[in-house]
Image (cartoon, rainbow, N blue to C red):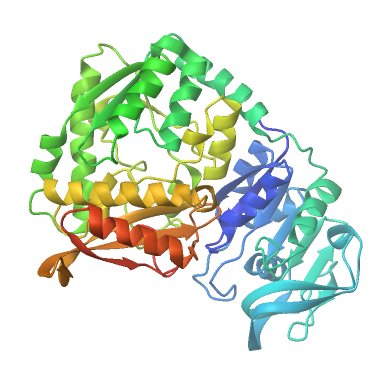
């Protein structure tokens, strides 16, 4: 059982994943758990502290998500954030009411007590608010320790129980001193030790993998992207030649991808690599399909079919390893434990039918993307692998709006190659989270060589992000965009127009489909 870790009860805030990241950045492991986890289960897992996340609901509503009341009797320090602070006050006998004015954005926090949670802060600090309700009466044993113009009770504490609540969001960058608040909670209040780093993760994970796998064989899908590459190397370090990596060329990959993967993993790292050419199978399955979710599901089903056929050839293989990451898990489940709207199907989550007969291993399941890169560095992978931009499981199929054909794939492949080449030449690649081309399902009129053309449009998508959960469109210099557009129109047959996507996430997703 992990000794020093923080349990984050998820009440549906868009910032919950940021709480986990901020705590891990302090060197303490954190994990997001369901808001209604039973107190005895939590106690059995032994966290050194509990964080109650924010959320969009109102605590006084009957159907709003509420925790097991027993968590307040475990003797474990608790930090409530926004909705979490209101929950704490409400459950322990205080009162929460609708505020006269909604408080949103940057606000001046006036601190009354600079000890404990606010140790090291100034009397006034900038914080980020996002709430419509507020605490109007304190529970017995609590006192107010900060206020804002709109919230007389903006932070509370019960020193004896080691319970703290803040109405603002210390996890977002708009609260500049939020990191100090988390460090105070972790090291002054919960007395946690900073034992979470990639060196310890590698040691612990390899030990656990060897224990779980024993003398068995493991099969994994290798795509050449960051996640699958790190997963493959981690497994290879753990079990060596008992790992079999299957690389399926589905015809939906980037230019030269097959060549690079073979050279790197088979020739350089000497991993058991099985390469499968399946372009015709995938294109036949995708013929006439336009809807993005249908594309994803067809590609997923076809992948499983091809993968299963290859895996059977290996004889008895008990384990299947997948490179599922924490954001995949978070986005693919409802934070309140009930059905919620599907944004898009993640290819790594819930996609395996029971009939495959493998036992699933997901050693990266609780890591964020930046942590996967740190892990890869610890494993000795080069930067050219670790800092590759994310590439979707369905590949170029979800970057072609509408039906996928061989002709469209070739057009998109060439355009994408030019984009990445120019982005790298301009020294921008490592500053971007992702940059790629999208082939639109429309043709426009153009003039080339005194002749009228009627050809496809390429959209360029480039974003900056910390973890892919939120993203801003990248402000690429005009001269770089001009060079990219000029090359694509002149070098890629079938394209006569290039446009740039300036949408952020939210409301848009990073990928178009």
Residue 6 x/y as whole percent:
68, 45
Give the side of residue 501 with respect to residue 444, left or right.
right
Q: Residue furthest bottom?
A: 100
Quarter of the image for residue 47 reads top right
Using the rendered image of the protein, determine whether residue 368 is visible from the camera's viewpoint: no
Residue at 36% over, 17% down: 266
Q: How many marks?
A: 0
Residue at 23% over, 32% down: 249
Residue 79 x/y as whole percent:
73, 58
Q: Give the vertical position of 364 relative to 185 (above or below).
A: above
Using the rendered image of the protein, determine whether residue 244 is visible from the camera's viewpoint: yes
Q: Residue furthest front?
A: 450
Give the side of residue 222 with respect to residue 154, left or right.
left
Residue 428 x/y as whole percent:
51, 52
- In which quadrant is the C terminus drawn? bottom left
Residue at 39% over, 32% down: 322
Residue at 27% over, 54% down: 399
Q: Give the vertical position of 236 relative to 485 (above or below).
A: above
Q: Give the vertical position of 304 relative to 127 (above or below).
A: above
Residue toward you, 338 or 464: 464
Residue toward you, 47 or 204: 204
Residue 134 x/y as whole percent:
68, 79
- In which quadrant is the N terminus drawn? top right
């Amino acid at each position: 059982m992990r000794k020093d870790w923080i349990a984050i009860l998820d009440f549906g805030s868009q910032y919950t994943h940021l709480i986990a990241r901020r705590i891990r950045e302090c060197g303490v492991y954190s994990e997001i758990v369901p808001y209604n986890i039973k107190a005895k289960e939590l106690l059995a897992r032994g966290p050194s502290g509990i964080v109650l996340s924010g959320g969009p609901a109102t605590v006084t509503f009957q159907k709003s998500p509420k925790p097991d009341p027993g968590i307040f009797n475990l003797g474990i320090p608790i930090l409530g954030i926004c909705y979490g602070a209101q929950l704490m006050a409400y459950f322990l006998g205080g009162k929460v009411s609708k505020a006269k004015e909604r408080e949103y954005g940057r606000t001046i926090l006036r601190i009354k007590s600079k000890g404990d949670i606010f140790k090291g802060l100034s009397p006034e600090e900038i914080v980020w608010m996002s709430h419509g309700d507020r605490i109007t009466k304190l529970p017995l044993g609590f006192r107010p320790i900060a206020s804002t113009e709109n919230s007389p009770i903006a932070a509370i504490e019960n020193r004896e129980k080691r319970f703290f609540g803040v109405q603002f969001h210390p996890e977002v960058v708009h609260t500049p001193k939020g990191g100090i608040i988390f460090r105070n909670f972790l090291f002054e209040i919960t007395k946690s030790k900073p034992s979470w780093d990639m060196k310890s993760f590698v040691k612990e994970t390899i030990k656990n993998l060897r224990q779980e796998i024993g003398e068995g064989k493991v099969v994994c899908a290798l795509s050449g992207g960051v996640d699958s590459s790190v997963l493959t190397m981690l497994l290879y370090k753990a079990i060596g030649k008992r790992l079999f990596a299957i690389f399926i060329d589905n015809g939906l990959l980037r230019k030269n991808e097959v060549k690079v993967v073979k050279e790197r993993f088979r020739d350089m790292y000497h991993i058991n690599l099985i390469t499968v050419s399946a372009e015709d199978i995938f294109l036949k399955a995708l013929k006439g399909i336009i809807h993005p979710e249908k594309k994803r599901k067809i590609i997923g089903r076809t992948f499983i079919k091809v993968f299963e056929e290859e895996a059977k050839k290996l004889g008895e293989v008990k384990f299947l390893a997948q490179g599922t990451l924490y954001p995949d898990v978070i986005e693919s489940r409802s934070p309140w434990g009930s059905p919620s709207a599907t944004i898009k199907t993640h290819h790594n989550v819930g996609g395996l039918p029971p009939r495959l007969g493998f036992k699933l291993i997901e050693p990266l399941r609780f890591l964020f993307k930046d942590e996967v890169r740190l892990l890869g560095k610890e494993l000795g992978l080069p930067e050219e692998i670790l800092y590759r931009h994310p590439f979707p499981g369905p590949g170029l199929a979800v970057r072609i709006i509408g039906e996928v054909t061989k002709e469209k794939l070739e057009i998109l492949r060439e355009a994408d190659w030019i984009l990445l080449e120019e982005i790298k030449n301009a020294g921008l690649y490592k500053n971007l989270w992702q940059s790629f081309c999208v082939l639109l399902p429309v043709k426009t009129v153009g003039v080339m060589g005194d002749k009228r053309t009627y050809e496809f449009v390429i959209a360029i998508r480039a974003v900056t992000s910390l973890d892919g959960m939120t993203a801003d469109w990248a402000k690429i210099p005009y001269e770089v965009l001009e060079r990219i557009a000029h090359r694509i129109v002149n070098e890629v047959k079938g394209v006569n127009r290039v446009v740039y996507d300036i949408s952020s996430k939210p409301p848009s997703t990073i990928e178009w489909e």
